[in-house]
Amino acid sequence: MIRKVINQIILALITAGIWFISLSYPRYVVMNLFFSALSFTLVYFFFKLILEETVSQKIKETKTRYSFRKVVSILYIFTFIGILFSI
């Protein structure tokens, strides 16, 4: 859990840095990079921190918890790829 929170903080800092760069250099490519980083940060926050951690803590059986985490990871990857293609 601590590692995921640290990853989220790092992603948020990278996204904020790209946002500051986009304020200085308002180019189309930089804005797309910012939106990609923002979408990656939000998708990671929702799937890995909120969904995976809260629901997997309630699952007692280890096999079921493992399967649930794998399903969430696959949904996370597909969602992120879908958002990147839409940007």
Image (cartoon, rainbow, N blue to C red):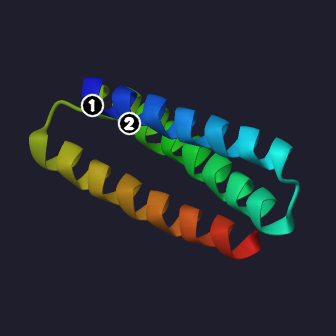
Q: Quadrant of the C terminus?
A: bottom right
**Vertical side of 20 occupied by 38: above or below:** below
In the rendered structure, are the residues bearing label 1 and label 2 in contact, judged by CB atoms less than 8 Å apart? yes
Q: Quadrant of residue 3?
A: top left
Residue lying at 74% horizontally and 38% vertically, measured from the top left: 20
Residue 82 at what x, y percent from top left?
Answer: 63, 71
The answer to whether one can see residue 20 in this image is yes
Residue 5 at what x, y percent from top left?
Answer: 38, 27
Q: Quadrant of the N terminus?
A: top left
Residue lying at 69% horizontally and 60% vertically, measured from the top left: 33
Q: State the residue lying farthest toward the bottom.
A: 85
Describe residue 42's horizontal placement relative to residue 86 as left or right. Answer: left
Q: Residues within 10 Å of mark 2 (few under 14, many from 20)?
A: some
Q: Nearer the viewer, residue 8 or 19?
A: 19
Residue lying at 83% horizontally and 44% vertically, measured from the top left: 24
Q: State the residue lying farthest toward the front.
A: 24
Residue 74 at what x, y percent from top left?
Answer: 39, 64
Q: Secondary structure at mark 2?
A: helix
- Which residue type carries mark 1? Arg
Write down the residue under mark 2.
7
Write down the residue under mark 1.
3
Describe residue 50's horizontal placement relative to residue 17 as left or right. Answer: left
- Which residue type carries mark 2? Asn
- Give me the C-alpha separation between circle 1 and circle 2: 6 Å
**Vertical side of 36 occupied by 56: above or below:** above
The answer to whether one can see residue 1 in this image is no
Q: Secondary structure at mark 1?
A: helix
